[in-house]
Image (cartoon, grey):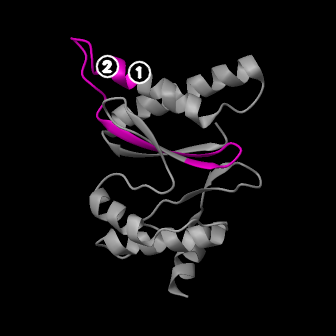
């Protein structure tokens, strides 16, 4: 949905199936209720599907973890595991070096009230754990503003500005 963004870790083909299913569930909710689906409801539907695939013979569990960000009344972050469990977070990292990144978040994260502050914190966190130089060509950045509640990916020029903010 327009107010939910997803990052993936694991098997991309499995994550594509799960995000397609999330889109279907969001469309069903919007059709029935004519409003944005609550992010929690979409997360629960995805995790119900993941859990079912971990329980039955003849099918393999999905090999993807998802990190969903959304703005309903307030910003939200959810993670889903391949087993079908989900959690809500203030700040979370998934994927390669996520354990180290999570420790960094525990030590350095404080509630960020402004989008600009969050952008700087995110890029500083990335720089701590990404071995390569961060350039607009090597990163993908998505944001959701609490004002318009719309998820969008930054273009090349915006990613360059994003990276420049952390240098200040």
Image spot of residue 8 (x, y percent):
40, 45
- Quarter of the image for the C terminus: give it: bottom right
Residue 53 - label: 2
Image spot of residue 127 (x, y percent):
39, 74
Looking at the rendered structure, the secondary structure element under dot 2 is: helix
Residue at far left of view: 57
First to last magenta residue range: 49-76
Q: Nearer the viewer, residue 62 or 77?
A: 77
> Looking at the image, do the residues carrying marks 2 and 1 touch, with CB atoms under 8 Å apart?
yes
Q: Nearer the viewer, residue 92 or 141?
A: 92
Say if the magenta span includes residue 82. Answer: no
* Tag 1 residue: 49
What crowding class fits label 2: few (fewer than 14 Cα within 10 Å), some (14-19), or many (20 or more)? some
- Residue at the spot 60% in from the left edge and 67% down from the top edge: 112
Using the rendered image of the protein, determine whether residue 120 is visible from the camera's viewpoint. Answer: yes
Q: CA distance from mark 2 to mark 1?
A: 6 Å
- Residue at the spot 27% in from the left edge and 16% down from the top edge: 55
């Amino acid at each position: 949905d327009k107010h939910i963004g997803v990052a993936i870790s694991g098997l991309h083909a499995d994550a594509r199936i799960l995000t397609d299913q999330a889109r279907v569930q969001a469309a069903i909710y919007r059709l029935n209720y004519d409003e944005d689906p609550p992010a929690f409801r979409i997360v629960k539907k995805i995790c119900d599907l993941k859990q079912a695939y971990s329980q039955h013979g003849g099918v393999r569990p999905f090999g993807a973890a998802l990190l969903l960000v959304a703005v309903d009344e307030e910003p939200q972050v959810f993670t889903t595991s391949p087993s079908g469990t989900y959690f809500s977070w203030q700040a979370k990292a998934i994927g390669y070096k996520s354990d180290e990144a999570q420790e960094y978040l525990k030590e350095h994260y404080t509630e960020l009230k402004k989008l600009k502050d969050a952008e700087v914190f995110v890029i500083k966190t990335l720089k701590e754990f990404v071995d390569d130089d961060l350039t607009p060509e090597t990163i993908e950045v998505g944001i959701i503003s609490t004002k318009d509640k719309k998820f969008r990916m930054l273009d090349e020029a915006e990613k360059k500005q994003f990276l420049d903010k952390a240098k200040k």
